[in-house]
């Protein structure tokens, strides 16, 4: 079927809906065949200075980091440094209470390990203030998770948990003998020349031109400027910084087969439904959304204090979308921003 052309007006409407719902600003960048680029910005990247939202500005991508981590770990699987169905305990003995938990369970959020962020951020602003300058050893985060009951038997169900990707980061360092930051640089950031992308931990500042993020409190009130934080509570589950064009490049390269051999990419994309609608699925560190026009798109969403992100591409990688809004703890703004996917990939019905 002819690809649906992106709908610029619908893209703009989605961005304005995100700002109407409380984001100071938002932006989206679509890339299509033949080097086509459709990009829009709205509002401000800095409420203090009034500086306009800017496609060249960097921001925290939250859980889109999980897809970078999954690619690195799957490259290590390809190099036979570990296997998807190895028990995690074979590589990190004694870390987890159950040797039935495998590497694949972590990447698919099927390990049953509880998500420590539920308790950590039960009260949004106080929880954030308590950790924004903290540096955690990943083992501390795993210990926090193990204080909570596990959600399911290993492999038995999907239950999203940041703990899984904190352990993925530890596996990457154990299997490669390098830091996760180095592995992201060597295997993805360098080869793809992602000049605005970095693993920023535990430094709190975002270097270069960047978007300031604004975290809404649970009760009505002024959003908190949450731009500077160690992101140490997230690490390989959410501590990367990037910019729209780099996210376009990354998801397009991944789906276009430039980062993983075909069998491992297929394993990554083998998604199982995560909700009753069946239009939202999860593979290995990757979400699949089945859009209203019948187009499946693959990528990840991100939520970190002050920033919402979407980074998705079509199965062939030839069309990709990166979108962000500089607010969080504001579900309506996140849903509105998600409207950029339909605008970009379903858009104006094929002429
Ligand atoms: C869901 C999302 N996950 C991520 O991006 C990871 C890194 N973020 C979280 O788990 C949310 C942490 C709290 C955010 C805070 N919320 C609260 O504190 C709520 N009490 C906020 O909204 O900024 C994803 O995979 O798309």
Image (tube, rainbow, N blue to C red):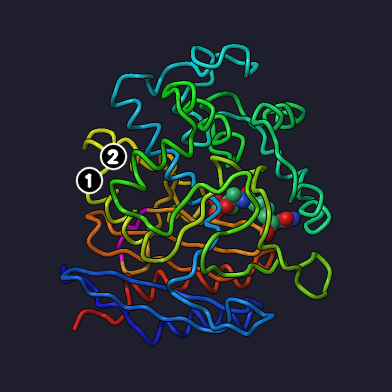
Work out whether residue 62 or residue 313 is closer to the camera in this orientation and state it: 62
Left or right of residue 34: residue 129: right
Give the Cα separation between the discs numbered 2 and 1: 7 Å
Position of residue 125 relative to residue 2, above or below, is: above
Q: Residue most toward the front?
A: 208
At label 1, counting other C-alpha atoms closer than 10 Å, the crowd grade (few under 14, some 14-19, many 20 or more) is some
Q: Are marks 2 and 1 in contact (CB under 8 Å)?
A: yes
Residue 243's spot in the image, x, y percent? 44, 63
Earlier residue among tags 2 and 1: 1
Mark 2 CB lies closer than 8 A to ligand 1 = no
| Residue identified by numbered label 2 | 265
Residue 287's spot in the image, x, y percent? 43, 50
At label 2, counting other C-alpha atoms closer than 10 Å, the crowd grade (few under 14, some 14-19, many 20 or more) is some
Position of residue 38 relative to residue 170, above or below, is: below
| Residue identified by numbered label 1 | 257
Left or right of residue 119: residue 49: left
Q: What stretch is highlighted in magenta?
A: 294-298
């Amino acid at each position: 079927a002819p690809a649906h052309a992106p709908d610029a007006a619908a893209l703009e409407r989605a961005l304005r809906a995100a700002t109407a719902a409380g984001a100071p600003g938002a932006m989206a960048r679509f890339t299509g065949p033949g080097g086509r680029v459709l990009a829009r910005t709205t509002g401000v990247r800095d409420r203090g200075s009034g500086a306009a939202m800017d496609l060249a500005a960097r921001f925290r991508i939250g859980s889109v980091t999980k897809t970078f981590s999954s690619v690195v770990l799957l490259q290590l699987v390809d190099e036979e440094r570990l296997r998807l169905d190895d028990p995690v305990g074979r590589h990190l003995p004694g870390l987890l209470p159950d040797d039935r938990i495998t590497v694949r369970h972590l990447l698919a959020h099927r390990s049953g390990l509880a998500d420590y962020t539920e308790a950590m951020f039960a009260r949004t602003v106080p929880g954030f203030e308590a950790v924004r300058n903290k540096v955690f050893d990943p083992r501390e985060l795993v210990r926090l998770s193990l204080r909570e009951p596990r959600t399911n038997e290993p492999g038995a169900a999907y239950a999203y948990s940041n703990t899984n990707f904190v352990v993925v980061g530890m596996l990457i360092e154990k299997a490669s003998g390098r830091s996760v930051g180095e592995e992201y640089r060597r295997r993805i950031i360098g080869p793809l020349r992602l000049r605005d992308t970095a693993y920023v931990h535990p430094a709190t500042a975002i270097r270069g031109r960047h978007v300031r993020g604004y975290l809404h409190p649970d009760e009505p009130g002024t959003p908190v400027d949450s731009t500077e934080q160690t992101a140490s509570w997230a690490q390989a589950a959410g501590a990367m910084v990037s910019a729209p064009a780099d996210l376009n490049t990354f998801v397009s390269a991944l789906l276009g087969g430039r980062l993983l051999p075909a069998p491992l990419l297929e394993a990554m994309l083998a998604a199982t439904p995560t909700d009753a609608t069946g239009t939202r699925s999860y593979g290995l560190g990757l979400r699949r959304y089945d859009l209203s026009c019948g187009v499946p798109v693959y990528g990840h969403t991100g939520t970190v204090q002050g920033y919402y992100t979407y980074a998705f591409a079509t199965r062939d990688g030839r069309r990709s979308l990166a979108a962000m809004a500089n607010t969080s703890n504001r579900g309506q703004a996140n849903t509105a921003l998600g409207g950029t996917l339909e605008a970009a990939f379903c858009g104006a019905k094929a002429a």
